[in-house]
Image: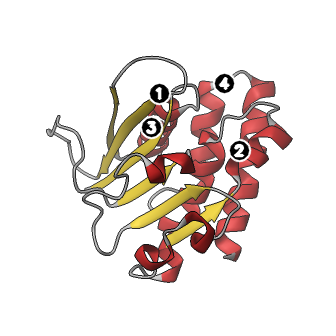
Amino acid sequence: MFEIRIHGRGGQGVVTGAELLSVAAFDEGKHAQAFPSFGSERMGAPVVSFCRIDDEEIRLREPILEPDALIIQDPTLLNSVDVFSGLKPDGYIVINSHRSFEELGIADYVAKFPPHHVGAFGATELAMRHVGRPVPNAALLGGLAAITGVLSFESVELAINHKFPPKIAKANIAAAADAYELAKAA
């Protein structure tokens, strides 16, 4: 089983990101589940969402405490929430930031992981360029697909097409494709 935990803030598409991952997994013939965990349900409040992917039926229903991968949609959470809690030693990290790991203050931590397991890119900037709104979730899913190989980019693209009307889907796919290429090149 591959378990993903997504950290962000209300309004950034954290819940939608987990749902898109689960749809992408279904499109590949896998089993998946996605569910959120809310504190105070308001814009800007910290939000966590979870996604499990497996080749067999998933019976677990609890939050993911030891993820295989993390998506951090808002780097300001690095200073206020223990986003790395429980991450497996060979896990994957995707961070929405154009700043270096040194600038983010996490260089020593991410140095423990294989270099190809960690990626940071400005997903919000990609979203603004393509979608016109600061919703980094689709771009981050493209980056996750690139560094983990757990899902193909094509299945992520298909999931985005399922979720959004054509014009919005096309813009989100463009952001995800740019992130995928950036993550592959890193």
Q: Nearer the viewer, mark 1 or mark 2?
A: 1
**Identity of the residue drawn at 46% across and 52% down:** 79
Which kind of residue does numbered mark 1 sit on?
A: Ala
Q: Nearer the viewer, residue 4 or 102?
A: 102
Viewer-nearest residue: 39 or 51: 39
Q: CA distance from mark 3 to mark 2?
A: 17 Å
Give the residue number, with chain letter if any, for mark 1: 45
Q: Position of residue 145 (x, y in %)?
A: 54, 58
Which is in the foreground here, disc 4 or disc 2? 2
Q: Give, as a three-letter code, the residue at label 4.
A: Phe
Local crowd size for mark 1, using a 10 Å CA cut-off: few (<14), some (14–19), many (≥20):
few
Report how far apart the C-alphas of labels 3 and 1 lie in the structure: 17 Å
Q: Nearer the viewer, mark 4 or mark 3?
A: 3
Of the residues tagged 1 and 4, which is closer to the observer? 1
Q: How is the image coloured?
A: secondary structure
Q: Report which quarter residue 32 is drawn in.
A: top left
First in sequence: mark 1 vs mark 2: 1
Q: Residue at x 65, y 67 (%)?
A: 183
Give the camera-side residue of 56 and 128: 128
The answer to whether the residues at label 1 and label 2 have Cβ atoms under 8 Å apart is no
SS at circle 1 = loop
Q: Residues within 10 Å of mark 4 (few under 14, many from 20)?
A: few
User: Which residue matches tag 2?
Assistant: 124
Q: Earlier in the sequence, mark 3 or mark 1?
A: 3
Q: What SS does tag 3 mark? A: helix
Label 1–label 4 contact, CB within 8 A:
no
Residue 178 % position (x, y): 76, 56
Mark 4, residue position? 164
Quarter that holds the N terminus: bottom left
Q: Which mark is residue 31?
A: none
